Image (cartoon, helix red, strand yellow):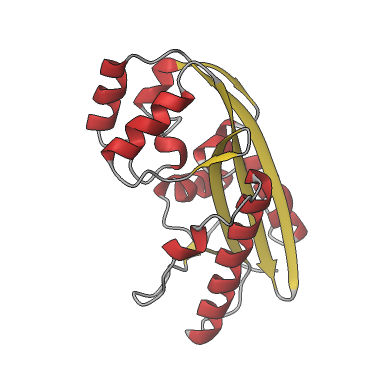
Amino acid sequence: MPEFIYLASQSPRRRQLLEQLGVRYELLLPDADEDAESLEAVLRNEAPTAYVQRVTGLKLDAAVARMKRRKLPPAPILCSDTTVAMGRVIYGKPDDARDAARMLGELSGGTHRVLTAVAVQAGRRRFEALSSSRVSFDELSAAEIRAYVASGEPMGKAGAYAVQGRVAMHISRINGSYSGIMGLPLRETALLLKAAGIRL
């Protein structure tokens, strides 16, 4: 039975959530010469669900190759990716403050989906799951959007917001997995880890 897993994610929120499950993990982060960002490029006409599952699979392939290249002791590897979608429109991480303000303006006053795909590679077997949640925002004024963007919190986050951060005061309703919206759905992750032989 594996003693620990590798977490192939730079997200501090994912680390925190894994710790909540009591899972021992080691980080398996990209080398300096790996172009991790390019894996997140959206294909033409790609549906949000297909996108988030494909990107998670690519991240996991890259992490498996990294483990072998570094000659690390084998252990299950966990990867995850989150995207925000309204209809077929995918909201990734904002390029800059202007892009963050645009995204928040489009999400304001409506309900969008947050999709998080999780995948675990254990030996030759791959286990996958998808969490889909709905989040409703109040109407945000231009001043509220400016203040939130100025806080710096939207940068590096899909859809330009962190559910556990300051934007929470503008969220009127959540339907689904709070941890999934944060970036790692704990129920689905626990089921995958158990399937991969991790004792929780």
Q: Quadrant of residue 198?
A: bottom right
Front-most of 5 and 77? 77
| Count of marks, rendered view | 0
Q: In the orientation shown, which residue stands out farthest toward the front? A: 44
Q: Can the viewer see residue 30 in this picture? A: yes
Is 82 positioned to the left or the right of 15 in the image? right
| Place of residue 10 in the rendered image (x, y in percent of width and height, measured from the top left) | 41, 57
| Place of residue 76 in the rendered image (x, y in percent of width and height, measured from the top left) | 63, 68
Is 108 positioned to the left or the right of 174 in the image? left
Query: Vertical placement of 113 versus 71: above or below?
Result: above
The quadrant of the image that shows the N terminus is bottom right
Q: Can the viewer see residue 71 in this picture? A: no
> Residue at the location (46% across, 30% down)?
163
| Place of residue 175 in the rendered image (x, y in percent of width and height, measured from the top left) | 64, 23
> Residue at the location (47% across, 45% down)?
92
Is 145 positioned to the left or the right of 80 in the image? left
